[in-house]
Image (spheres, helix red, strand yellow):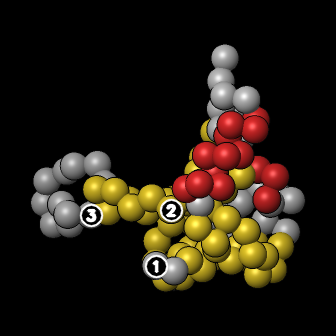
């Protein structure tokens, strides 16, 4: 049992930022996404301070499936999709990105 769709939409509206998305069947579409920038999984060696940057984008905002190389423009910069996850519990794509 999850949150009702209206509750998920409210959470998304509250936390999401405006972005411009190119890919998944759209060209420079203004939508919203929840930006996340957290420490990456720990490991030893060079790069141990890596970050994991991602965007949560609602399924309804994209007509197609996001793919590697799609571009997101956000106030933090220009990002390219490097990996895609699907979270049915919140009705969103979770897109890992790297600076483009």
Taking the spot 85% from the left edge, 69% from the top edge, the residue there is: 25
Q: Which of 40 and 46 is in front in this view?
A: 40
- Mark 1 / mark 3, whichever is N-terminal: 3
N-terminal-most mark, 2 or 3: 2
In contact (CB < 8 Å): disc 1 and disc 2: yes
Residue 87 in percent (x, y) is at: 63, 39
Residue 30 position (above or below residue 82): below
Which residue is disc 3 drawn over?
50
Query: How many other residues sit within 10 Å of disc 3, few (<14), some (14-19) or many (≥20)?
Result: few
Q: Mark 1 points at which residue?
A: 76
Q: Is residue 11 visible?
A: yes
- How far apart are the alpha carbons under marks 1 and 2? 9 Å
Marks 2,3: beta carbons within 8 A: no
Mark positioned earlier in the residue sequence (1 or 2): 2
Between marks 2 and 3, how big is the CA–CA gap?
Answer: 17 Å
- Which mark identifies residue 84? none
Mark 3, secondary structure of its residue = loop
**Residue ID for mark 2:** 35
Q: Are marks 1 and 3 in contact (CB under 8 Å)?
A: no
């Amino acid at each position: 049992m999850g949150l009702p769709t209206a509750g998920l939409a409210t959470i998304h509206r509250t936390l999401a930022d405006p972005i411009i998305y190119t890919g998944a069947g759209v060209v420079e579409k203004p939508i919203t996404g929840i930006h996340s920038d957290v420490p990456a999984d720990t490991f030893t060696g060079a790069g141990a301070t890596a970050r994991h940057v991602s965007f949560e984008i609602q399924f309804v905002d994209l007509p197609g499936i996001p793919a590697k190389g799609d571009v997101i423009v956000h106030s933090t910069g220009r990002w390219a999709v490097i990996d895609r996850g699907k979270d049915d519990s919140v009705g969103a794509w979770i897109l890992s990105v790297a600076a483009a």
